Amino acid sequence: MKKSKLTGREVIMVVFLVVLLVGVCYYLLFLTPLKKDIADINNQISEAESQLSVSQAQVASMDKMQAELDEILSRPKDEITEIAPYDNAKQLMRELNGILAHGSDYSISFADPIIGDDGIVRRNVNLSFTASNYANAKNIVSQLANNRWRCLITDLSVSAEDNIESGAVKVEAIMTFFESTNLK
């Protein structure tokens, strides 16, 4: 058997093939999986940052709600309004009649209640009354706004009566009272 020697050109080609084989193996077995792992980790970081942002927003919202609740609960007991159970019209009518008795020529009309998907009922009430003077009208409106039941005055107009010398004022308002179907 005769041993053959590799020529310089063959040695260069073998070295080139070995380097090429090592490079391909490095790329396929190490670099490609590493790039995939890095991309997966970057996606996880992005998802974690998104979740962190959402969580921070929720915490900020909860802190704001807690501050509002603390502020409400720190009020004197007679200033805290409550959400009435659904169909509170009779009690509401009694409350409004008691407040509006301080005026004269008052009228109250209830619109059909609007029940939201959240279980909150909005009951619009149109009312008008005459007060002997502006201070009396202001007192009645204040009592309406701060009554026992949760409400929102959505429209208010105050005008002088025809006989301006009497000092009487006519007040018209639209109020929304809130009730809940979830309360028992």
Image: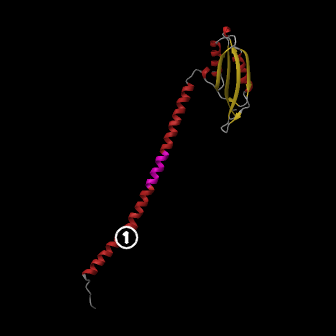
Mainly helix, strand or loop, the magenta region?
helix
Q: Which residues are magenta?
A: 41-51
Residue 47 in the image: above or below residue 4: above
Mark 1: secondary structure: helix
Provide residue 25's location: percent of width, then percent of height: 37, 70
Instruction: State the image quarter where residue 16 is shown.
Output: bottom left
Image point 63% across, 22% down: which residue?
145
Instruction: State the image quarter where residue 178 is shown.
Output: top right
Which quadrant: the C terminus? top right
> Position of 26 compared to 95: left or right?
left
Furthest residue toward top:
165
> Position of 24 compared to 70: left or right?
left
Provide residue 70's location: percent of width, then percent of height: 54, 28
Q: What scheme was used to colour the molecule?
A: secondary structure
Q: Nearer the viewer, residue 63 or 137?
A: 137
Q: Nearer the viewer, residue 175 or 47?
A: 175
Q: Nearer the viewer, residue 173 or 159?
A: 159
- The residue that label 1 is drawn on is 24
Image point 73% across, 27% down: which residue?
110
Provide residue 50's location: percent of width, then percent of height: 48, 47
Which quadrant: the N terminus? bottom left
Instruction: State the image quarter where residue 123 is shown.
Output: top right
Provide residue 165's location: percent of width, then percent of height: 67, 8
Disc 1 residue type? Val
